[in-house]
Image (spheres, rainbow, N blue to C red):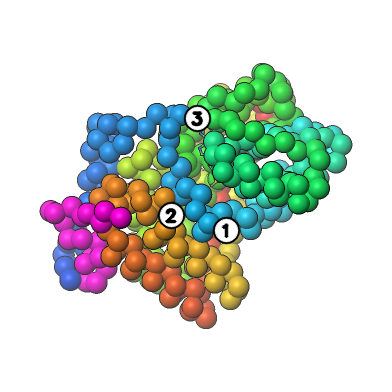
Amino acid sequence: MTGSTNEHHTPRSDRLAGTDPIDAVDAPSSLSRLTGQDRNDPGAVKDLTKESESYTHGHHESVLRSHRRRTAANSAAFLLPHLLSDMTLLDVGCGPGTVTVDLAERLTQGSVVGVDASDEVLESARGLADAHGTKNITFEHANAYELPFEDDSFDVVFAHQLLQHLSDPVAALREMKRVAKPGGFVAVRDADYAAMAWYPESPELTEWNTLYHEVTHAYGFEPDAGRRLASWVRDAGFDPDTIEPGASVWCYATPDDRTWWGGLWAERCTESNFAVQAQDSALADDVALEQLAQGWREWAAAPDGWFAVLNGEVLARA
Ligand SMILES: C[S@@+](CC[C@H](N)C(=O)[O-])C[C@H]1O[C@@H](n2cnc3c(N)ncnc32)[C@H](O)[C@@H]1O
């Protein structure tokens, strides 16, 4: 790993160590400066096209470990009351497919298609469906901006934790609307990083949250997607009268949940694509990333540790 830092600013690792409190409190971070540069000059940090957008987390095992805990009940509860057993459903950005397979098992007379831009996770999703013996499901490679389906194809088009990873979420929502049948459901759910809350207080977790915003902004993505979903859905041309905004929370506070959530984020800080992007953008070096990882391990070990992820949700009609 390259491990560069901005020479005009105290390195993130020193800020955490408290060696320069003035810089730590008052100065814009090196990441904020890069973000501003990026907004004025889209080529400054990365030349990303919609087809080649770099998924912030990548598919390191620590990332998939997070996604594999997801079920229809803990990730799509707002959609479940509207499902009928014979519906057709498309899951856009399905990842390793745990929610997708769960949904297919509820649509006993219907069928489900999961699509993702990563062949690696699609293989994992197919393996999961095989292991479950789920027959009414297929997985295909597809780009959310150019779904390979006719207009008016699905009763339900669903995307879970996808829009925060797209530079143009409104364009993807328009595409989701296109392939949904008239009157069909479009359902989206995304976390909101600025609304995440935790205890005990931790300078490392605060710095992690700041860095996460800086990295995703540098790459043109919006980590505070949850609060923006209804706005994006309106901008995509949905009838405002059909838009049902909401929110729900994941909470990790039991010893098992803390070990899982804290452990996977500790790994993601040093091993995942997030770590690579943080270093490539000169927003953090390997020392700072290891400090953030240690902060996550300490949070996980705290007997009173508590972490809440606020998710925005929207159900709309095509
Ligand atoms: C945070 S994961 C969510 C996975 C799954 N929906 C879940 O909740 O477990 C986001 C997924 O979106 C996929 N993705 C990112 N950009 C995409 C695009 N333009 N088209 C299709 N999939 C995309 C990534 O490969 C990744 O698997």
The reply, left or right, for residue 1 in relation to residue 59 is left
What's the residue type where badge 2 is placed?
A: Ser
Q: Residue furthest bottom?
A: 303
Choose between 139 and 205: the one closer to the eye: 139
CA–CA distance in space, label 2 to label 1: 12 Å
Range of residues picked out in magenta: 1-18
Q: Quadrant of residue 252?
A: bottom right
Mark number displayed over residue 34: none
Q: Is residue 5 magenta?
A: yes
Residue 272's label in the rendered image is 2
Sort mark 3 into few (<14), some (14-19) or many (20+) by Cα contacts within 10 Å: many
Task: Indicate left or right for 128 with 305 as reference.
Answer: right
Image quadrant in which the C terminus is located: top right
Determine whether label 2 and label 1 are within 8 Å by CB: no
Residue type at mark 1? Arg
Q: Position of residue 121 (x, y in %)?
A: 59, 45
Residue named by callout 3? 170
Callout 3, which amino acid?
Answer: Val
Query: Could you give the CA–CA distance between mark 2 and mark 3, rounded to whole angstroms?
Result: 27 Å
- Mark 1, residue position: 65
Q: Residue drawn at (72%, 36%), measured in percent from left and top?
A: 138
Location of residue 180 with respect to 38 vertically, above or below: above
**Mark earlier in primary sequence (2, 1):** 1
Other residues around mark 1 within 10 Å, as few (<14) / some (14–19) / many (≥20): some
